[in-house]
């Protein structure tokens, strides 16, 4: 089981804090945006005598409300096509265990969400990467490169759209190209759309659920963690119009009994979040993104693409080894008694040696904190012994 590149440096961060240093966490997608009041009030005003198990597929009231939510954003599904999961993580794991057998393969553009590696190990399957590049702002690799990787063991393609860790937003045209491969080879398309609500500059998200001709091949993964800034409730969803997939996945859901009860209550209430909340969040993240991209690209030797979605980006640094640099930042460096925690990008690639001079940065801090963090990062790069 691989260590998480997002969390593996936590002991060094804790030690830096024990030394009295301020640590700016750019390593993890934990928003500082307030959770909607409707969600918190649903918990505060709860009047239950017993916290019971729910249905293994989730509370019926929540699933009905979710179906209406998706229909409202143009995804036509019903309650039987939704399963509530313990975070989007469990949805990915259930999808892989349901649709693939041990030894099967699934293709995904890299860099990719690092925990896909862990889910693959758990499911006994193999992730086959097709590399996207920072010089192209991590656009979808040429379709022929994806098709060249298909073997008799290939059972699916995973995409994250908008993408974690790159912030790239796949266009409708790119998704149609993927659709054609899925249809031609009759494989699955696992579409992780947890960051659907975070698209910038007027860009629109296009869901894989709306691809024509592959309805039985598409499995949607979703989560409330980022949409409503409630990562700790651990509620996600597995969605497919393929009844065989949903029936088989329910067996895995029954084995873990039920998703979190309090989390479902908060998540169900969250659907009533006023639209103004999302407008404000989008404006805030757009401002943070614009500030971060401009500030990072002013540092000599640094290149930061401009993300189209989510709240991450992969940044190229003038360092010999980003793993060593990230650890050095926490163990040996301080500027004005503060330092920065980043996620080395090597953990988001499967191809050996890739991402050695890259880090993932999450712009989930307010601009004043981002300003201090990026200033600190710039000062660190001036004195880092392994600078290129």
Image (cartoon, rainbow, N blue to C red):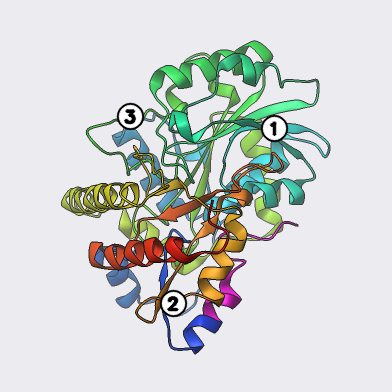
Q: Earlier in the sequence, mark 1 or mark 2?
A: 1
Cα gap from disc 3 to disc 2, whole angstroms: 49 Å
In what element is the residue under mark 3?
A: loop
Residue drawn at x 65%, y 46% as measured from the top left: 94
Residue 334 numbered tag:
2
Q: Is residue 41 above or below residue 175?
A: below
Residue 74 numbered tag:
3
Cα gap from disc 1 to disc 2, whole angstroms: 42 Å
The x, y position of residue 62, in whole percent, is: 41, 53
Residue drawn at x 56%, y 76% as measured from the top left: 331
Query: Left or right: 292 with respect to 383?
Result: left
Q: How many marks?
A: 3
Q: Do the numbered discs 3 and 2 sit on residues whose CB atoms are within 8 Å?
A: no
In what element is the residue under mark 2?
A: loop
Task: Report the mark closest to the observer, 1 or 2.
Answer: 2
Q: Do the numbered discs 1 and 2 sit on residues whose CB atoms are within 8 Å?
A: no
Q: Is residue 57 visible?
A: no
Was residue 4 drawn as part of the magenta stretch in this picture? yes
Q: Is residue 102 above or below residue 76?
A: below
The x, y position of residue 367, in whole percent, is: 24, 62
Mark 2 crowd level (few <14, some 14–19, many ≥20, 10 Å Cα)? many
């Amino acid at each position: 089981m691989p260590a998480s590149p997002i969390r593996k440096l936590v002991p060094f961060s804790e030690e830096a804090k024990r030394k009295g240093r301020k640590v700016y966490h750019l390593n993890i997608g934990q928003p500082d945006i307030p959770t909607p009041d409707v969600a918190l009030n649903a918990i505060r005003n709860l009047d239950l005598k017993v916290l019971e198990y729910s249905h293994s597929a989730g509370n019926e009231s929540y699933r009905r409300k979710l179906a209406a939510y998706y229909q409202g954003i143009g995804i036509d599904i019903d309650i039987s096509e939704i399963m509530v999961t313990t975070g989007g993580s469990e949805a990915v794991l259930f999808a892989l265990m349901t649709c693939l057998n041990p030894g099967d393969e699934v293709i995904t553009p890299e860099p990719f969400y690092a925990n896909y590696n862990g889910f693959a190990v758990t499911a006994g399957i193999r992730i086959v990467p097709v590399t996207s590049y920072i010089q192209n702002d991590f656009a979808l690799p040429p379709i022929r490169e994806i098709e060249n990787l298909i073997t008799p063991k290939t059972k699916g393609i995973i995409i994250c759209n908008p993408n974690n860790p790159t912030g790239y937003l796949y266009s409708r045209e790119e998704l149609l190209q993927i659709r054609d491969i899925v249809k031609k080879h009759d494989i699955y398309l696992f579409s992780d759309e947890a960051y659907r609500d975070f698209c910038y500059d007027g860009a629109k998200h296009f869901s894989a659920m709306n691809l024509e001709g592959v309805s039985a091949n598409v499995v949607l993964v979703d989560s409330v963690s980022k949409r409503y800034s409630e990562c700790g409730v651990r509620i996600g969803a597995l969605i497919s119009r393929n009844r065989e997939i949903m029936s088989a996945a329910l067996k895995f859901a029954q084995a873990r009994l039920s998703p979190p009860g309090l989390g479902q209550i908060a998540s169900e209430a969250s659907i009533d979040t006023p639209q103004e909340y999302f407008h404000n969040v989008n404006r805030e993240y757009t401002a943070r993104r614009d500030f971060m991209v401009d500030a990072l690209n002013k540092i000599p030797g640094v290149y930061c693409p401009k993300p189209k979605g989510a709240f991450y980006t992969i940044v190229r640094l003038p360092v010999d080894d980003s793993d060593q640099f990230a650890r050095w930042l926490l163990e040996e460096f301080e500027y004005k008694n503060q330092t920065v925690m980043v996620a080395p990008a090597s953990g988001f690639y499967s191809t050996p040696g890739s991402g050695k001079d890259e880090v993932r940065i999450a712009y989930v801090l307010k601009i004043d904190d981002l300003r201090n963090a990026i200033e600190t990062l710039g000062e660190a790069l001036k004195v880092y012994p392994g600078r290129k």
